[in-house]
């Protein structure tokens, strides 16, 4: 199993706290694995094995458990009277009314409850009402570049980065020895998300429209995308649709974590803006699976990868607006913030590209850190307080450099 230190650290921090631990993320990103790593850590800390009770509702053992009564009974039959019981429920949303079982288990003093799900709606509706203020969310992504690189010691970061783009970041792809079979695996993930997580329940019934919107987003990562622009583009190409319909499908694509939206943030006005946001894909390998081997925009792909890493490190990530210019990302956490500009290269004969990328950062007058991240392999330099950093060094660093 691949070590997932970011998420394991969070689980260990919240161990035995009086909150339900909710692990969410796109399918096959490693939620079950990180729970298994956590179980191993519990055993090392002398927790009796019989006090660790787990069930995957998509496994052979769990597939016949379809409602909350059966789910609750499964655990009540196995709870030990002595010591804390650690309850793990994978893909909990498969059981109707699961929130009632989760709530009942949570109220038992000798139960520490952990659940996983592949849809952000896990935290909406009745669960949020029942458990308001009594759960914390741990959001997982597929492998970060640093986690991916840790599997291939001795290889150059540049070669690993090429493979990272080619094969994607889902953990299981690292077990596929022949890369020719990777697209088949990624296609299966994509189809499962589309059919099982999005179209199930007739929420987004038009599969053709769903795939076209998805293709549009993959093809426009890093570009401003309004729902009107998407609707107008699809209509002009012969697929008539409306803004409300596109909005519904975009919400569904974000709910299953296939895409993330970076909304705009006015740095001077310190306010969030409703227009001009961008979308980023959860995995670049999926992008290639959908779009095929068309010429890649390496700058926007790098921007996508930096965005995902900022989500891991900071949580809140926005597109920055400063005057009439744009900063690629403003990362915010606990009142602190950081600014990031991303460019594949800023090397040219007269320095115009470098000045163009620095200009938005130079307009920021507060005291927070500013970074220019590129794929130019040069030592870290400072441009009047703006640090220019080699992207692969930044991606594998344990903290901002």
Image (tube, rainbow, N blue to C red):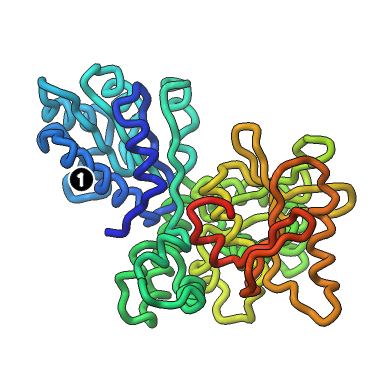
Q: Secondary structure at mark 1?
A: helix
Residue 87 placement (x, y as % from top left): 24, 33
Point 83% across, 43% down: residue: 365
Residue 274 placement (x, y as % from top left): 76, 41
Point 59% across, 59% down: residue: 306
Residue identified by numbered label 1: 40
Outermost residue toward the right in this view: 324
Q: Is residue 179 above or below residue 215?
A: below
Q: Is residue 87 above or below residue 28?
A: above
Q: Considering depth in this image, is 295 or 334 the residue closer to the camera?
A: 334
Point 70% across, 73% down: residue: 345
Q: Is residue 6 left or right of residue 259?
A: left
Quadrant assignment, res 326: bottom right
Q: Is residue 252 left or right of residue 181?
A: right
Q: Is residue 30 above or below residue 161?
A: above
Q: How many marks?
A: 1
Regarding residue 203, the answer to whether it shows in the image is no
Q: Considering depth in this image, is 267 or 141 the residue closer to the camera?
A: 267
Quadrant assignment, res 350: bottom right
Q: Quadrant of the N terminus?
A: bottom left
Residue 265 placement (x, y as % from top left): 75, 42
Q: Is residue 109 left or right of residue 120?
A: left
Point 52% across, 45% down: residue: 255
Residue 269 placement (x, y as % from top left): 83, 36
Q: Quadrant of the C terminus?
A: bottom right
Regarding residue 54, the answer to whether it shows in the image is yes
Q: Is residue 253 left or right of residue 76?
A: right
């Amino acid at each position: 199993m691949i070590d997932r230190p970011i998420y394991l650290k969070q689980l260990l921090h919240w161990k035995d706290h009086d909150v339900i631990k909710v692990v969410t993320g796109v399918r096959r990103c490693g939620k079950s694995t990180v729970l298994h790593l956590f179980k191993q850590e519990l055993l090392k800390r002398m927790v009796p094995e019989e006090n660790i009770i787990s069930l995957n509702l998509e496994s052979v053992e769990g597939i016949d458990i379809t409602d909350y009564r059966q789910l609750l009974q499964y655990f009540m039959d196995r709870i030990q009277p002595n010591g804390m019981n650690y309850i793990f429920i994978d893909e909990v949303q498969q059981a109707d009314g699961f929130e009632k079982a989760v709530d009942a288990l949570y109220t038992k003093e000798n139960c520490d409850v952990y659940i996983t799900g592949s849809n952000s709606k896990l935290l909406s509706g009745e669960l949020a009402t029942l458990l308001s203020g009594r759960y914390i969310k741990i959001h997982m992504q597929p492998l970060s570049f640093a986690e991916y690189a840790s599997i291939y010691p001795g290889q150059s970061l540049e070669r690993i980065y090429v493979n990272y783009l080619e094969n994607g970041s889902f953990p299981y792809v690292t077990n596929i020895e022949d890369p020719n079979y990777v697209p088949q695996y990624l296609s299966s993930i994509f189809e499962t998300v589309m059919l099982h997580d999005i179209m199930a329940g007739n929420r987004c019934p038009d599969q053709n429209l769903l795939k076209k919107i998805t293709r549009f987003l993959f093809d426009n990562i890093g570009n401003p995308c309004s729902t009107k622009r998407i609707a107008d583009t699809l209509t002009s190409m012969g697929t008539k649709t409306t803004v409300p319909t596109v909005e519904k499908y975009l919400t569904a694509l974000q709910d299953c974590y296939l895409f993330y939206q970076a909304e705009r943030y006015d740095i001077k006005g310190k306010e969030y803006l409703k227009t001009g946001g961008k979308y980023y894909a959860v995995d670049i390998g999926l992008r290639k699976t959908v779009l095929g081997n068309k010429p890649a925009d390496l700058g926007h792909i790098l921007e996508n990868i930096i965005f995902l890493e900022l989500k891991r490190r900071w949580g809140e990530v926005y597109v920055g607006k400063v005057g009439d210019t744009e900063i690629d990302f403003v990362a915010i956490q606990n009142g602190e913030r950081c600014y990031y500009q991303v460019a594949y290269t800023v090397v040219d004969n007269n320095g115009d590209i470098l000045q163009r990328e620095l200009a938005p950062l130079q307009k920021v007058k507060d005291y927070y850190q500013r970074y220019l991240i590129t794929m130019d392999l040069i030592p870290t330099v400072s441009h009047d307080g703006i640090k220019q950093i080699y992207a692969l060094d930044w991606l594998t660093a344990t903290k901002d450099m």
